[in-house]
Image (cartoon, rainbow, N blue to C red):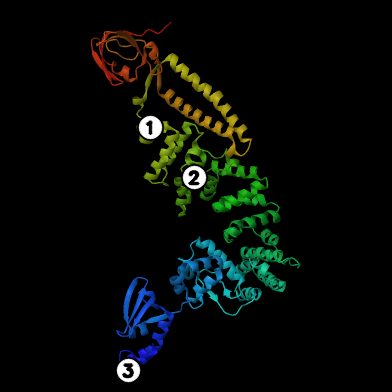
Amino acid sequence: MRDELEKLVAAGKIQKSHIAPLLSLKEAGFCHHKSWGFGRIVSVDLALGRMNIDFTNKAGHSMDLAFSAESLKPIAKDHILARKALDLDGLKREAALHHLSVVKLALSNFGGSATADQIQAVLKDIISSDWKKWWEVARSEMKKDGHFTVPLKKTEPILYQDSEVNIGVRLATDFKSAKGLKARVAVASEILKSVADINDKAVITEIVAMLNADITNHAVTMPALALEGVFVRDDLKKLAALDIPEGPITAREILNGQSKLVEFFAELPAAKHRRTLEALRDSVPDWGSKLIFIINNVSAKLAGECARILLIENRGPLLKQELIRLVSQHGASSELLLWLGKERDDHFADILGPEVFRAMLTAMERDAFNEKRSNRLRDFILDDIKLLPELIESADVDVIRDLTRSLQLSPSFDDMDKRSLFARIVKAYPAIQEMITGDNKKEDHIFLVSWPSLQRRQEEYQDLVTKRVPANVKDIALARSYGDLRENHEYKSAKEMQRVLQRRKAELERDLGRARGTDWANVRTDVVGPGTVIHVTEVQSGVQERLEILGAWDGDPDKNILSYLTPFAKVFVGQPVGAEVAFRSEGQSKKYHIDGIAAYVPAA
């Protein structure tokens, strides 16, 4: 091909400087253009002076030879882009078995240095499995391999070098070059993952000594960072089985000197909170009271960690007492209530009631007043559709009315969100619907009942509140003592009965408040109404009937006693003697003639 290119030079179609690039492109078989990207060289037509290339998004593109020599970069057949074009399936099999060789190929695409994101972009069509899982394995292997330098930050490039560096030497070098205790703690944390691969204990011993010096320098000015250093130092000593004296500064000394634990925990990474709490328990005699003191001023996650260790160490009653105080006084923070609402643990079943929701409203309003912009508690209340029904499931209807009024007045939710919350309340307590909609005109809801029926309902209500509800409370307490409420059939049954009883109690309270007793004295007999006896004739059949039109709770159709609120009775109410009325039932319409009206006389 060189001879043909020389002839083209002599003919003035290309320059002599174009020969070497064109030969490289022909030999490579693949190329890269700055605008069109990767391409496969299909053919070279010397007669026409053209090179035909299949680019990724520009197949069958024809280019002038001179322009090709100047604008195309040859790509070798062992390059990862060429490998993907030639044998993508084979490359996928290699990636599944040999992570490092594929990463090395990807790095070669960037000259031996690339970030994790750049590598992922190149390998995205090769790694068919979960990328995150694959990359974690590859990253772990790179750290152990002496040819790769893996930075701590994701944005910094991964490097590949031909010469192999001993892992112990490399990690020690990284540690020494790290500036400041924070950077050294980060490097030491990475070293922890490779301790088993470091054969020279002297390397670990030197790192521990350097950590001790830095910890001492920061123990007073940056105690939280110093404690992180203590944790990683102690872990290194333990994993490397180093037989050296305890460091000059310990976790006990740092924690005993902290009077402002809220600020101290704020400076610690969340991943270190649990270990710090355990160290506090082991170091400070009155650790329990200190956690109770801070639990209302920390994040929801840290509040959960505090509660966890208090329960494990049998400080549950102390925690519960503080929670009851904070909720009842509406002093609980939104973060503490967020944890309590999310947790809804069996230990706090007797706390989780309507007052918790009222405390949540107060906490959100307090945050708004103090210009705290977090909406985490508000979003949680809206997203967890079971929260509000569970908090109010055993409450009296009067308590629910008060809670509903508080929600109506709360500025923490907009109108649409309030409607969503009201719907959850009404589903559990239908009687609240009137209060929410405003359709509560007293005169529209009063109804007449006989004294005997009113007495029966009052007796049912007294039996409910004095016997059945207290008995149910005892059943719930007994069932809870059996433990593991998720698999506790007795507990579930008792809670279900509690819902039934509370619903009936709300219905009775609503109805008794609307009912008006009467003895049916001095009723009108010029028209049909409550307290009258009427004689009617069914027009078509001629059948005569005697009907008693009585109170809302007196109906007994088998005895021809009708509640005046039933549809059948309503067609007669207000009609005089001689009137004819029609009633449609089960698809048939019947006409009745009112023969006579008399006053109802109760039995003696």
The residue closer to the viewer here, 169 or 101, is: 101
- Which mark, residue 360? 2
**Residue type highlighted by circle 1:** Glu
- Looking at the image, tell me whether mark 3 or mark 2 is earlier in sequence order: 3
Q: Toward which corner of the image does residue 575 lie, by quadrant?
A: top left
**Residue type highlighted by circle 3:** Ala
Vertical arrangement, residue 284 with respect to residue 408, above or below: below
For image coordinates 68% across by 61% down, the residue present is 251
Specify whether 240 is left or right of 499.
right
- Looking at the image, tell me whether mark 1 or mark 2 is earlier in sequence order: 2
- Residue 237, given in percent of the width and then of the height, sits at 71, 66
Classify mark 3: helix, strand or loop. helix
- Which mark, residue 434? 1
- Which mark, residue 137? none
**Residue type highlighted by circle 2:** Met
- Which residue is label 3 attached to? 10
Specify whether 539 is left or right of 9.
left
The answer to whether marks 3 and 1 mark residues whose Cβ atoms lie closer than 8 Å is no
- Looking at the image, tell me whether mark 3 or mark 1 is earlier in sequence order: 3
For image coordinates 63% across by 51% down, the residue present is 291
The residue closer to the viewer here, 81 or 86, is: 86
